[in-house]
Amino acid sequence: MDQEKRDIELIIGRILRIGVVISAIIITAGIIIYFISGSGYSGSGEFPRRFTEIFSGIASGKSYAVIMLGIFMLILTPVLRVVVSIYAFFKEGDKLYTIITTIVLIILIFAIFWGYRS
């Protein structure tokens, strides 16, 4: 059981490292695109906030859209960590922490969709 617990902790650490590195690479790519193109997004100068705006902006080569994708990936990294933690607590048979962590995940998802709606 201790080896399995250690493996899960290593997986969680790897998820956090990989998520941060991928986000940094994407954000750096967006910054490079910004300096090469000299412009960020549409005439309004606002960052894209909707998924459709982000993906259409990436398809158009807009730097702000690439940067926003990197930020979105950075936000999803700890959410994925919470999901893995739920699995870890469930495997350990710790019902209390499984319930608490599931509630935290529900709150995170609610906050993400609430912010997306605004």
Image (spheres, helix red, strand yellow):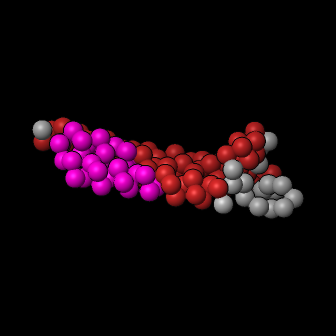
The answer to whether residue 98 is magenta is yes
Q: Is residue 110 left or right of residue 36?
A: left
In the image, residue 78 above or below residue 52 = below
In x, y percent, where is residue 6?
20, 43
- What residue is drawn where x is 57% and y is 53%? 113
Residue nearest the viewer, comparing 117 with 44:
117
Vertical arrangement, residue 95 with respect to residue 111, above or below: above
Q: Could you tell whether 102 is left or right of 79 in the image?
A: left
Left or right: 59 with respect to 28? Answer: right
The quadrant the N terminus occupies is top left
Please indicate whether residue 9 sits to the left or right of residue 70 in the image. Answer: left
User: Residue 43 falls in which quadrant of the image?
Assistant: bottom right
Asked whether 91 falls inside the magenta stretch, the response is yes
**Which residue is at 84% across, 61% downward?**
44
The structure residue drawn at horizontal position 62% and vertical position 55%, both measured from the top left corner, is 116
Res 38 visible:
no
Q: Which residues are magenta?
A: 81-108
Front residue (pair 66, 36): 66
- Between residue 71 and residue 18, name the one nearer to us: 71
Res 59 visible: yes
**32 or 69, which lies in front?**
69
Q: Residue 112: percent from the left, percent from the top?
A: 54, 55
Magenta span main SS:
helix
Task: Point out the image quarter for the C terminus.
Answer: bottom right
Q: Residue at coordinates 67% horizontally, 46% vertically from top-left?
A: 51
